[in-house]
């Protein structure tokens, strides 16, 4: 090559070298390896081959193949050149790595023997010839190298041949599948061959495990008689040791990182679309069976969870708390595929072009309406109602509109609402076509079902929005009359509530990103339909539009905000007053007063607020119709009081006792001494800590969704379930929480300033 | 004004006050002296019920303050207390410390209270500190503010609980002078103190408390110059004298010197006197050194009011021995020095003891 | 007691500061011994920084002086003042020893 080309080439090499991190060396063919960072194991044949064929590269020298794989994975090296069979085990365990098709070279594997020991060489060669004739070598190769085993095969040869002596063998037990440790024992192809050698020669083989580089010196010094360690035959080594005939011929290949895009282009700028971990190149998902060793997401505790756990034992199963979380995980590549309600998925796919179903619905689960066990009357009425609408075609019309066509219009349903109320529990972010919030009202198949049923009974419909996990508890304590939330009928649940006749059969579908699928038209379609990644600002503007403006979603947020503030402020006031009382009792010398106080403080501080909240709502006020906001105020207030009591106590005890005595000596009563002398100093002292606890309280209120209070966090959940945009609503809600805390904090700081006596004087001094 | 009868106070097993009976008349200035831990402060704190007596009665202007129906806070407003640890209200300025009680308890207007308080602060010499806060003041200033604060309520009786014990020597006099001035105002005062000179100066009556009782009482002259009872005498002497025991010839000269110096400082003796005391002691001990193997030596250094001079007494047990005999000494150097420093040297033999009394020359 | 030694042409100047009492006299005697054994025979002792002297110190001075006399040496005292001077006077040392008002005066007088 002429000088200019050489120069350009070196510059390019240097450039690729230095633009390393994140985007470096996306290698898709052997030629690209030269000049990059290659990992090799000291003295191995891979080492020799790499240096021979890729002389311009930088070499990262390690001692174990697992380390080398890690280096490539974490971008400390670009390729690992080694025995293909070992690489194959690595690739099993590291889906982000892939073996380039073209091998670097082929090499033979043989036993290594001391140079002078031609006798042993002859004996071993004889054994190998026999084994080859018997086909044993091929069988062994099949067993260990060619099959991608999932559980380590057992050694079939016993090592207890009648003793004509002992043969000492050396190996390096870090090379799967040749010589490695599994379940605490040394095993592998080389170990099995060593046993065969021992058996045929009538000797016991003693195996010593050592570092690879130590094997040749050990041979030369006679510490070992022979070595089996996936030894490649090389000219250099032949100068030092004697080789037997080869017992295996192997490829030496290169292990590289899987590139982000099949066509090797640069990754897109849109954060949500960067697929950091798409699935194995050589194994796209063509059918549900392909999931067996992938990462699958499901909704925690759902029937899909149970199904996948049972049927895909080798897969990595990740459980999420909400459907939007599952969506996010699939789209960001954290999982390869997920299983969810088929009907809901259909709905989602309508608006999301990145996703696709894998196969058909796997199984059907009947869903029914949940009733309190003792409410047979209502249940019968519902079953009758269901039969009726099935007969008169309303049911079919509903299915057609909501599920098949995906319409979102709620029909007008006349209801006299004169015979009482019907309280229905539902989950507002379940998703279409069943339940969703649009234009600030609940719509969906389930919603229409409830409305029609209520109308048929002439009862006013009251919808209680709650967390999925609380529905059953609510029904069994009669807080709600029925559950309409695509509740699957399971044996477990039948123990706690009674179900109506099933009103639908929900499918279970598996979905994944289109690009994870094999269909060639899928990628073409993707290329065509994939929008140009929007710029960051446009992205934000879009998010803003869809999350806040569209369908007046900001009203949801304002409502939630109001609720959060109300709960926080009321709970604080209640908690502070209660805390003062508890503190007073705690500091009394009378055991009747201070023991209950101490007990209160330790119990309330040791119980998580969520538990307290649910206890009060579902147990204490079980059959009472109480406003859940009030329950929240009580629960948070009680918890806050326990901390406030201790804070007060520390503050009071921190004030010098002598000042109290001075007050009393002057003629102040105990109470006025406390009010005028102790309290002002206490307040000053404790304000910083009190502020902290108060802010904690504000943030703690985000859990009230569990008792069906729609606060700021729930508002964000609802929006998320519509837009499936995780980022924007969360960030916005975080900002709002911060603003609430900040504003309330400012008022406390104002109080702090007003009670700082010195501040008054400093102001005066400045005047 | 205050009639105390058979007052007693017990904490668990410990009886701090056994049986106190005394009348405190209007306008009296009573000092209470005595060893630490004998209940002086407890007695004082019982008078205004900061501590509750276990037995006995206390009548203030005819009202039994131990009665359950007594309006104790109101009664307390007639008294006030100055504490050893000042106890100023740290969240209030100096002025506010003074005005808070008049405003809140007497209903005075803020303006009146501030005017009166300002006068009081002038009285104690801290008028320019009205807006300062307690943590900005020195110990002596804090105590003066505390006294002014006491006066703000125009009490009939002020109780002082070791008012100068927490102050370092430089500030003691400023506080004592304030208290001294008060005694001329006709307020009844009860002062627990360790400042003997002061107590002698200002008191109309002195109580020596020991063993949970008023062990001896009398006028300052009686108590300080002519204590009748054994313990009183011992106490008075002890406060004014320095004791040291030499038990071996390897005594630590410098350790003893340090203690002598402290004693001299306490008595505020001039530097020359201090030097002479040290020299005298060293020369004496030098002369006694051959005998230190066989006998113990008790040194007592006392300041005699009568003679306005220092007296050094050296006592030893055993055989009759007066080593200041030039025939017994290798040279006269030490003896000459001793003679030049002393006015008189007496030797006495009492029971089995040798007592050498040296009166130092006035320097 | 602190002892500083300075060798001048006509004599060795010993500056003593602090206390000259029963505890510190041995230190003085030892120092002087070493110097005399080393050959020095002419000394000037500067008392300027001395606060205190007792009979023990006087004896120490006497001892050294006698030592020197035996060797034909001499010793002069400079800056003896204050309480130290009083002690000298009481014990009659004022007449036994050669005393000068300053170190230079002493050095000049050393023959």
Image: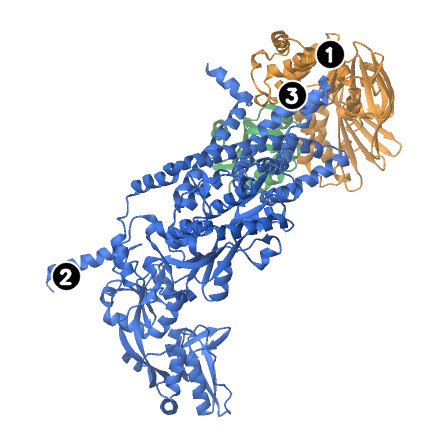
Numbered mark located on residue A438 in the image: none
Q: Which chain is blue?
A: A
Q: Is residue B126 left or right of residue B43?
A: left
Of circles 3 and 1, the one toward us is 3
Q: Is residue B247 left or right of residue A337?
A: right
Q: Which chain is disc 3 placed on?
A: A
Q: Is residue A542 left or right of residue C27?
A: left
As measured in the structure, the alpha-carbon distance from the residue carrying label 2 to the one carrying label 1 is 105 Å
**Nearer to the camera, B68 or A495:** A495
As measured in the structure, the alpha-carbon distance from the residue carrying label 3 to the one carrying label 2 is 89 Å
Q: Is residue A2 above or below residue B288?
A: below
**Nearer to the camera, A373 or C88:** A373
Q: Is residue A427 above or below residue A738?
A: below
Q: Which chain is disc 1 placed on?
A: B
Q: Quadrant of the C terminus of chain B?
A: top right
Of circles 3 and 2, the one toward us is 3
Numbered mark located on residue A676 in the image: 3
Task: Indicate how the structure is coloured in the image.
Answer: by chain
Which SS class for mark 2?
A: helix
Disc 2 packing (10 Å; few <14; some 14–19; many ≥20) = few
Identify the hue of chain C.
green
Which residue lies at the image location 66% right of the left edge and 22% below the top edge?
A: A675
Q: Which chain is disc 2 placed on?
A: A
């Amino acid at each position: 090559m002429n000088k200019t080309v050489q120069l350009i080439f070196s510059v390019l090499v240097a450039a690729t070298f230095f633009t390393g991190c994140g985007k470096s060396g996306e290698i898709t063919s052997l030629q690209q390896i030269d000049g990059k960072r290659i990992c090799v194991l000291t003295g191995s044949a891979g080492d020799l081959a790499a240096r021979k064929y890729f002389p311009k590269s930088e070499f990262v020298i390690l001692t174990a193949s697992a380390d080398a794989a890690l280096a490539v994975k974490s971008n400390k090296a670009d390729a690992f050149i080694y025995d293909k069979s070992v690489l194959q085990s690595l690739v099993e365990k590291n889906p982000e790595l892939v073996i380039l098709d073209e091998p670097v070279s082929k090499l033979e594997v043989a036993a290594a023997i001391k140079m002078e020991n031609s006798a042993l060489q002859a004996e071993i060669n004889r054994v190998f010839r026999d084994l080859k004739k018997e086909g044993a070598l091929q069988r062994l190769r099949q067993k260990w190298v060619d099959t991608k085993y999932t559980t380590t095969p057992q050694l079939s040869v016993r090592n207890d041949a009648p003793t004509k002596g002992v043969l000492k063998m050396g190996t390096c037990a870090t090379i799967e599948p040749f010589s490695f440790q599994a379940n605490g024992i040394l095993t592998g192809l080389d170990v099995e061959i060593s046993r065969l050698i021992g058996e045929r020669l009538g000797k016991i083989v003693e195996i010593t495990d050592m570092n690879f580089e130590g094997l040749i010196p050990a041979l030369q010094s006679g510490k070992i008689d022979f070595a089996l360690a996936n030894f490649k035959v090389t000219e250099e080594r032949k100068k030092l040791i004697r080789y037997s005939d080869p017992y295996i011929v192997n490829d030496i290949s290169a292990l590289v990182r899987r590139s982000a895009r099949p066509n090797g282009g640069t990754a897109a700028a849109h954060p949500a679309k960067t697929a950091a971990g798409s699935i194995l190149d050589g194994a796209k998902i063509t059918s549900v069976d392909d999931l067996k060793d992938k990462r699958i997401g499901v909704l925690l505790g759902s029937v899909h969870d149970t199904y996948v756990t049972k049927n895909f034992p080798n897969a990595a199963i990740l459980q999420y708390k909400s459907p939007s979380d599952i969506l996010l995980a699939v789209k960001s590549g954290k999982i390869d595929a997920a299983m969810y309600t088929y009907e809901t998925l259909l709905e989602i796919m309508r608006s999301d072009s990145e996703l696709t179903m894998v196969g058909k619905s796997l199984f059907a689960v009947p869903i029914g309406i949940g009733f309190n066990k003792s409410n047979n009357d209502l249940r019968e009425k519902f079953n009758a109602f269901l039969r009726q609408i099935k007969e008169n075609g309303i049911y079919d019309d509903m299915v057609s509109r909501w599920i098949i066509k995906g319409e979102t219009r709620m029909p007008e349903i006349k209801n006299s609402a004169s015979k009482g109320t019907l309280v229905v529990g539902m989950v507002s972010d379940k998703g279409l076509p069943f339940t969703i919030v649009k234009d600030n009202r609940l719509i969906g198949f389930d919603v229409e079902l409830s409305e029609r049923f209520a109308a048929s009974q002439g009862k006013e419909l009251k919808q209680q929005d709650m967390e999925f996990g609380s529905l059953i508890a609510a029904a069994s304590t009669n807080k709600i009359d029925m559950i309409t939330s695509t509740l699957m009928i399971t044996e477990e649940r039948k123990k706690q509530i009674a179900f109506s006749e099933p009103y639908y059969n929900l499918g279970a579908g598996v979905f994944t990103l289109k690009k994870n699928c094999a269909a060639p038209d899928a990628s073409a379609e993707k290329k065509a339909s994939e929008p140009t990644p929007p710029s960051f600002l446009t992205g934000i503007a879009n998010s803003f539009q869809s999350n806040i403006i569209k369908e007046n979603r900001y009203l949801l947020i304002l409502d939630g905000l109001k609720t959060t503030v109300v709960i926080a402020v009321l709970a604080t006031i209640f908690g502070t007053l209660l805390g003062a009382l508890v503190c007073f009792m705690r500091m009394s010398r009378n055991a009747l007063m201070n023991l209950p106080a101490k007990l209160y403080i330790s119990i309330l501080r040791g119980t998580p607020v969520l538990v307290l909240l649910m206890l009060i709502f579902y147990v204490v006020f079980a059959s009472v119709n109480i406003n859940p906001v009030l329950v929240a105020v009580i629960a948070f207030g009680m918890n806050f009081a326990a901390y406030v009591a201790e804070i007060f106590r520390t503050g009071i005890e921190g004030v010098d006792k002598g000042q109290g005595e001075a007050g009393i000596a002057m003629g102040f009563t105990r109470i006025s001494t406390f009010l005028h002398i102790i309290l002002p100093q206490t307040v000053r002292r404790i304000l910083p800590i009190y502020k902290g606890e108060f802010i904690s309280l504000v943030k703690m209120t985000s859990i009230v969704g569990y008792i069906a209070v729609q606060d700021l966090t729930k508002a964000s959940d609802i929006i998320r379930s519509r837009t499936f945009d995780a980022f924007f609503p969360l960030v916005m809600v975080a900002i709002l929480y911060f603003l609430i805390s900040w504003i309330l904090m400012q008022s406390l700081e104002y109080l702090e300033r007003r009670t700082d006596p010195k501040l008054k004087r400093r102001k005066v001094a400045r005047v | 004004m205050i009639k105390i009868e058979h007052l007693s106070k017990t904490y668990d097993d410990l009886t701090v006050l056994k049986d106190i009976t005394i009348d405190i008349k209007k306008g009296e200035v009573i000092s209470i002296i005595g060893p630490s831990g004998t209940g002086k402060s407890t007695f004082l704190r019982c008078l205004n019920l900061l501590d509750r007596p276990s037995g006995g009665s206390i009548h203030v202007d005819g009202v039994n303050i131990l009665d359950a129906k007594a309006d104790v806070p109101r009664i307390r407003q007639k008294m006030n207390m100055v504490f050893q640890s000042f106890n100023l209200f740290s969240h209030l300025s100096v002025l506010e410390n003074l005005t808070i009680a008049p405003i809140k308890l007497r209903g005075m207007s803020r303006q009146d209270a501030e005017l009166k308080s300002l006068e009081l602060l002038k009285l104690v010499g801290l008028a320019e500190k009205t807006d300062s806060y307690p943590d900005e003041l020195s110990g002596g200033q804090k105590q003066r503010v505390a006294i002014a604060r006491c006066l703000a309520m125009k009490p009939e009786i002020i109780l002082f609980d070791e008012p100068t014990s927490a102050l370092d020597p430089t500030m003691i006099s400023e506080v004592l002078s304030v208290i001294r001035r008060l005694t001329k105002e006709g307020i009844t005062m009860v002062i627990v103190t360790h400042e003997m000179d002061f107590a002698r100066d200002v008191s109309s009556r002195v109580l020596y408390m020991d063993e949970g009782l008023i062990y001896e009482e009398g006028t300052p002259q009686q108590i300080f110059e002519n204590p009748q009872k054994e313990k009183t005498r011992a106490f008075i002497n002890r406060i004014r004298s320095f004791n040291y025991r030499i038990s071996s010839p390897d005594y630590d000269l410098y350790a003893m010197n340090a203690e002598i110096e402290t004693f001299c400082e306490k008595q505020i003796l001039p530097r020359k006197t201090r030097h002479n005391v040290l020299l005298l002691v060293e020369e004496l001990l030098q002369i006694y050194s051959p005998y230190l193997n066989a006998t113990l030596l008790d040194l007592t250094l006392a300041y005699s009011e009568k003679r306005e001079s220092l007296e050094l007494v050296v006592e030893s047990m055993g055989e009759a021995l007066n080593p200041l005999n030039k025939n017994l000494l290798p040279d006269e150097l030490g003896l000459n020095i001793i003679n030049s420093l002393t006015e008189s040297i007496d030797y006495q033999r009492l029971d089995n003891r040798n007592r050498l009394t040296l009166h130092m020359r006035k320097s | 007691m602190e002892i500083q030694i300075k060798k001048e042409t006509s004599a060795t100047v010993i500056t003593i500061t602090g206390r000259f009492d029963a505890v510190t006299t041995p230190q003085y005697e030892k120092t002087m011994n070493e110097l005399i054994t080393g050959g020095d025979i002419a000394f000037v002792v500067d008392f300027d920084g001395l606060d205190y002297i007792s009979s023990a110190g006087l004896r120490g001075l006497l001892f050294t002086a006698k030592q020197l006399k035996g060797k034909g040496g001499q010793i002069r005292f400079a800056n003896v003042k204050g309480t130290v001077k009083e002690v000298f006077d009481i014990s009659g040392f004022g007449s036994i020893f050669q005393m000068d008002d300053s170190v230079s005066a002493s050095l000049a007088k050393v023959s």
